[in-house]
Image (tube, rainbow, N blue to C red):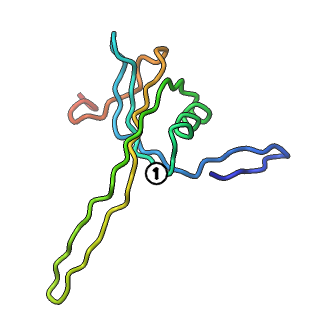
Amino acid sequence: MSWFRNRGNLMWMPTMTMTLLSCRDATARLPARAIFRVEPRMTKHEIKEYLMKIYGLPVKKVNTVNFDGTRKRIVGKRFVAYTKYNDFKRAYVHFDSSIRKLGVSFRKGTMWD
């Protein structure tokens, strides 16, 4: 997070990334839901504030799951090297019942049919 001074007013400018993995439109029983990949240091409150203040989305609930990065072993001719991918967190965001459709689905075969 970073703070930015704009003409005397103090504004909060997020420096953390959120990547949309998938989304589901609302049905008769279930609210609309989106899954984001976020940085592990982001909390549920920060995710909710990020979506509500910047994008104006009515967020009802946020669930998070932490994932450890995959470990990999690379075998060479003279040595064995070990590496690890970055850790990440998934955020399952449930929206208010006022949102029915989240947008275009980018599943294979549905974009230009």
Q: Quadrant of the image for the C terminus? A: top left
The percent coordinates of residue 110 (x first, y second) are: 24, 30
The percent coordinates of residue 66 (x first, y second) are: 37, 47
95 or 70: nearer the eye? Answer: 70
Q: Is residue 28 left or right of residue 76?
A: right
Residue drawn at x 23%, y 67% is: 72
Dot 1, how many residues are within 10 Å of its Cα: few (below 14), some (14-19), or many (20+)? some
Residue matched to label 1:
39
Q: Is residue 74 left or right of residue 35?
A: left
Tell me if residue 17 comes above or below residue 91 in the rendering: below
Tell me if residue 59 comes above or below residue 3 in the rendering: above
Q: Residue furthest left?
A: 77
Residue drawn at x 33%, y 10% is: 28
Q: Amino acid at mark 1?
A: Glu
Q: How many marks?
A: 1
The percent coordinates of residue 49 (x first, y second) are: 59, 35
Q: Is residue 31 left or right of residue 47?
A: left
Q: Residue furthest bottom?
A: 78
Q: Residue furthest top?
A: 28
Question: Would you identify the image quadrant in which residue 9 lies?
Answer: top right
Tell me if residue 94 comes above or below residue 40 in the rendering: above
Q: Is residue 110 left or right of residue 102?
A: left
The percent coordinates of residue 21 (x first, y second) are: 35, 40
Q: Does dot 1 land on a helix, a strand or a loop?
A: loop
Residue drawn at x 78%, y 45% is: 10
Question: Would you identify the image quadrant in which residue 82 lies?
Answer: bottom left
Residue drawn at x 44%, y 47% is: 38
